[in-house]
Amino acid sequence: MALINTAIKPFKANAFKDGEFVEVSSEDIKGKWAVFVFYPADFTFVCPTELGDIADKYEELQSRGVEVFSVSTDTHFTHAAWHQSSDTIAKIKFAMIGDPTGEITRNFDCMREDMGLADRGTFIVDPDGIVQAMEITAEGIGREADDVVRKVKAAQYVASHPGEVCPAKWKEGEATLAPSLDLVGKI
């Protein structure tokens, strides 16, 4: 799990996006912020709640120049069927990547090899293709899109303000810190 500050590996895959089958690749995110949301499987229980939650934040993320990709080891055909059969999944406008070989899931180090399924992994990638934040949770623990958005905002802030860092619970517009010897032992 040493992916922070490393470049994502090149990939190319089929996806279902906004009613169409498309090809997506690591080239598509060059120069853009991206969020990759890995999840175990379509037609399950916690997964649609998470994907529906991130779908509700997609427009806000897009307004910040962020593209979202959900990834599971299902095929893009399965994603299309799920999109057509679930009101929650029907809200999704971002690319739902099919990774039946597990290559992308392994590249992000979140494959459960014994099951052939992805862990619940969220990765925030900067415009240079470098992983800036990641979170992996156990299967029964769902993620919250508001926190993903908060982390994206913090990553974007830090990237555009060298020498500043965002403390715990930081929200856009709040004070940041400028690490220095003067702060050591005073926080």
Image (spheres, rainbow, N blue to C red):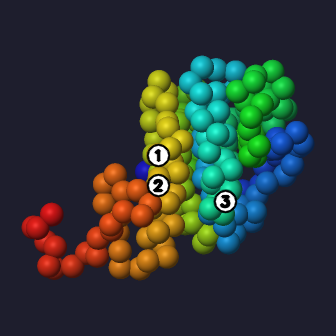
Residue designated by label 2: 151
Instruction: Estimate how packed mark 3 is, as few (under 14), some (14 to 19) or many (20 or more) residues with alpha carbons within 10 Å.
Output: few
Question: Mark 2 or mark 3, which has the lower sequence index?
Answer: 3
Q: Are marks 1 and 2 in contact (CB under 8 Å)?
A: yes
Residue designated by label 1: 147
Instruction: Estimate how packed mark 1 is, as few (under 14), some (14 to 19) or many (20 or more) residues with alpha carbons within 10 Å.
Output: few
Q: Quadrant of residue 74?
A: top right
Residue designated by label 3: 63
Locate residue 89, reporting x and y percent: 73, 30
Disc 3 residue type?
A: Ser
Disc 2 residue type?
A: Lys
Locate residue 70, reporting x and y percent: 67, 42
Q: Secondary structure at mark 1?
A: helix
Nearer the observer, 29 or 5: 29
Vertical arrangement, residue 52 with respect to residue 174, above or below: above
Give the Cα distance between marks 2 and 3: 15 Å
Given the current orientation, which residue lies at the most extreme right position? 20
Vertical arrangement, residue 144 with respect to residue 45, above or below: below
Locate residue 86, reporting x and y percent: 76, 22
Q: Is residue 7 visible?
A: no
Which residue is depicted at the point 47% across and 24% down? 140
Q: Secondary structure at mark 3?
A: helix
